Structure formats: C-alpha cells, structure tokens
Amino acid sequence: MDYYLLTARSITHVQQMAKALEHTGVNAKIRRVGTGVTKSGCGYTLQVPERQYPRCAERLRAANVRPVRVLHVTGGGTQEVPL
Amino acid sequence: MIYLDSAATTFRKPQSVRAAVLRAMQTMSSPGRGGYRSARAAEELLFRTRSLAAETFGVPSPEQVVFTASATHGLNIAIKSLVPPGGRAIVSPWEHNAVTRPLHALGAEVSVAAAPLFDDDACLRAFQKALRRGADAVVCTAASNVYGYALPIEEIAGLCRRAGIPLIVDASQSAGVLPLDLTALGAAFAAMPGHKGLYGPQGTGLLLCGAEAKPLIEGGTGSASLLQDMPEFLPDRLEAGTHNVPGIAGLEAGLRFVREKTPESILRHERRLIRRAAEGLSRMDGVTPFISEDERRQVGVLSFTVAGRAPEDVAEALASRSVAVRAGLHCAPLAHRSGGTAGTVRVSVSAFDGEAEIDGFLRALRTARNP
C-alpha cells in the first residue's frame, strides 16, 4: 500500500505532529527510522496512508507543525514532495 | 516529625506522585531509543509532561521544555548559553549560589541591583540603573529562598525587554505558587526544580527555553546519531543521555496535583501559615522574623533570627524536638549580605502543612529557648 512518511527532527517533534492529527480521522503511525530515511541517522517519522495525506497536510499547516521532509512511498519508489 | 523545610524539598508528596514513580519503574524503559512498548510508554510520558509544562508556564511549544536534574542544572545551561567567559551579568541581591557560582566560574563581571529587602520600588530603580550599563544577561530569582521575598519579576522582565537584555528567571521558590508565563515575560530562560513547589521527586527539573541554548554536556540523544555535534534542535540539544523516567513520571503527577489544587490556593494557604508563624515568633523576646508587610510580596518561606543564638544551634534544638527547619546561609551568601544577616533559621511550608504544624513548631521553639 502506498503511503507518506513525514520525517521529524526528534521524537518530540513527531509527537507534536501526531498530537496535531488527533481527532482528525487520520491514521498516523509513529515509526522509528534510520539513515535510509533521515540522512543524519536515528530519527522518527509519521507514516500516513496515501488517501489521508491531503487531510493530514491541511491539519499540519493549520497547526503550524511542519515536518522536516515529506516522502511519498509507492510501489515504484520514494519521492520527496512538498507539504 | 513536623517538617518545615519545603523550600529545600517538599518532603510529603501526593500519593499520585509515589504511584507514578513506581508505575514508571515497572512499565517504562528508555525513551527515544526504540519502537517497542516500554520505550513508547516512556516517550509518551515525556511528551505529556512537556506539553503540560508548556501549557502551565506559557511556553509556545513542548520542544522548548527541557528536562534537567535540578534548577541548578537548568541555570547553568542558561547562564553558560548567554554569558561568555569574562562577560557581564546583572543579578538581584537575593540570588542563590546556583546563579552566582556559575557566573564566578565564568569570570563574569557581576553587577548587583542592590535594594533593601521587600522594597519593590527600590528594586526596580536598581535594575533600571544597572541596565543602563548593558549586560549579556540579567539573572533574577522570582522569590528569595532565604526571605521568601517575591520580587516584581513582571516589571523586571519589562525593564529587560526595553533594554534588549535577555532575562533568566530562577523560579526555584516560585514555581507552583506564583504565575510564570515565559512568553508574556519575554524571558530567555526560566529554570525550576521538580522537587519543590511542583511536588515531584528529587533529581528532576525543567528549563523553559525562549532563546538559543548551548549544551552543557554531550552524548547520545537517540536522534541524528551520525552527527558528532549535538543536534541543533530542542529538546535533544540539551538532553544527552537517558532521561530520569521515574522522576519525570513523578513530576508529571506533581504538576497535575498543583494544577488541580491551583497555585493560587496553595499560595493563599502557605501565606496564611507563614503569617501565623511570624505572628507567633514576633511575640517571643529576642526573636526577629523577616516578613513583608505587603502579603503579596511573600511566598511560603520565612527567615528569623534568635538573639544570642546561632541559627544552627536553634535548628539543632528544634530537630531534637522532631521539628525540621533549615539553618545557616541557605546557599545564598549574597542574599544574607544584602539582607544584613549572617545566617538565619528558615521555616518553609507546603500544601500539606496546617496550623497544627506551625503551632507545634512555635511550642518547640519556646521550650528550646527555655528548657
């Protein structure tokens, strides 16, 4: 299944994003990730199902809690996209 | 035992604090180090506590709430972030060694905004004058740990903002009883212990960050591990090593206890007890309590002296009658120089004390003086 990964500075940052998405119906999952995703090693991302991403992005913009990067992960590969 | 040394540590803790510490030890491991259940439970605790502290103390984001081991730890970070070696700082006359020793270690030129005890107008004039010369930072306690004097911190913050000089607030004796809003103050930092007015365990503290901070120690953060420099972002930048998870669990429960009771009602209660103690002391020959005539300028801390008796002797005599008070300089020699004392006996109260404790202390002091 295709999904989006929203990378965070820290566990606290990813928790802030998850908190902003509470009660929005977005099924966001905190995942610990490594250098393949973060470049600087050991980090956290929020995984969001593809179909829920527009609602997620809208909510994060409104809450002014922005991820470091947004990666669109599909069967065909991974692509960085703007929030 | 009658325990009246809450300015050092609130010894009696809410049951919820003790339960939270135990629960954390049974269910939580290292936060920010794994994706398994016990690590996640610890991470959620930290985030809840940061969020609660941010909401309580007017901090824009939980990322700006840093866990420390004590107020001293937080003050060291704050002072060493703002004052370079050989720099210049302005302090109030009521500062603790947690402020003056780091400044001394930096070789800083320290200007004391000297003013008489409990005199707000003189205090503000002194800060105004000192600020004209400029400084790298102002460090000011919100309440004296010796005399319980609640300084006009909002007005001092206003003077600092207008002068463009960053303010570090030492909230050691005020957190949990006096309001503190980091954003409204425009303060660079505020440091507080967890184990006093927030009713958490010893070994906990909070540093609220409104300015860029430098790490005091370096180490693992569970983030950006390929980099050998500490992360640039908060709170990781200032939190190397594994957190005191049981302590933070207790601190969260303590914060909730304070919010539920409300700082205003705790302060009212403590002021009433301190007034009662001061009235009793002032009826004893040769005993001098130091208390503000304006109740709003006092927290639940009261110093007194006994003519012809060393404070330590008085405290020892009280201890032998199962009354715990503190005696001496209270780690604040500057405050004693400023207040004209060479040591005092200090009584300090918490939400758990009542009139019975104060009356018991006064009875014990009478018999200690006339055995």
Image: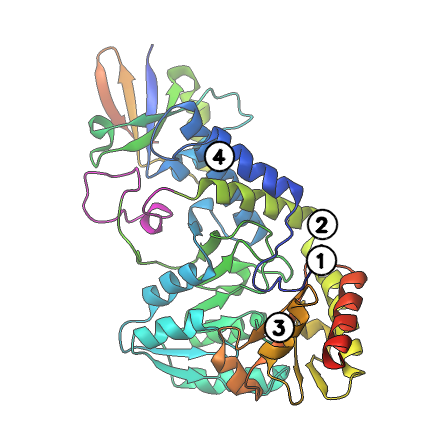
Vertical comparison of B220 with A14: above or below: below
Q: Earlier in the sequence, mark 3 or mark 4?
A: 4
Q: Position of residue A16 (x, y in %)?
A: 45, 37
Residue B361 in sight here: yes
Q: Position of residue A69 (x, y in %)?
A: 29, 33
Mark 2: amino acid = Lys
Can you identify the residue that label 4 sits on? Answer: B25
Q: Earlier in the sequence, mark 2 or mark 3?
A: 2
Check the image and name the residue furthest to the front. B371
Label 1 neighbour load within 10 Å: few <14, some 14-19, many 20+: many
Q: Position of residue B77 (x, y in %)?
A: 36, 61
User: In the image, what residue occupies the spot 36% across and 42% down?
Assistant: B242
Give the main secondary structure, helix, strand or loop, of the magenta stretch. Answer: loop
User: In the image, what residue occupies the spot 28% across and 71% down?
Assistant: B84
Q: Earlier in the sequence, mark 1 or mark 4?
A: 4
Q: Earlier in the sequence, mark 1 or mark 2?
A: 2
Can you identify the residue that label 1 sits on? Answer: B266
Determine the chain carrying the residue at label 3: B
Q: Earlier in the sequence, mark 3 or mark 1?
A: 1
Label 4 neighbour load within 10 Å: few <14, some 14-19, many 20+: few
Which label is found at residue B316?
Answer: 3
Of residues B33 and A45, the one nearer the viewer is B33
Determine the chain carrying the residue at label 1: B
Mark 1: amino acid = Ile
Closer to the camera: disc 2 or disc 3? 3
Magenta stretch, residue numbers: B220-242
The question of residue B239 being in magenta is answered with yes
Q: Position of residue B131 (x, y in %)?
A: 44, 82
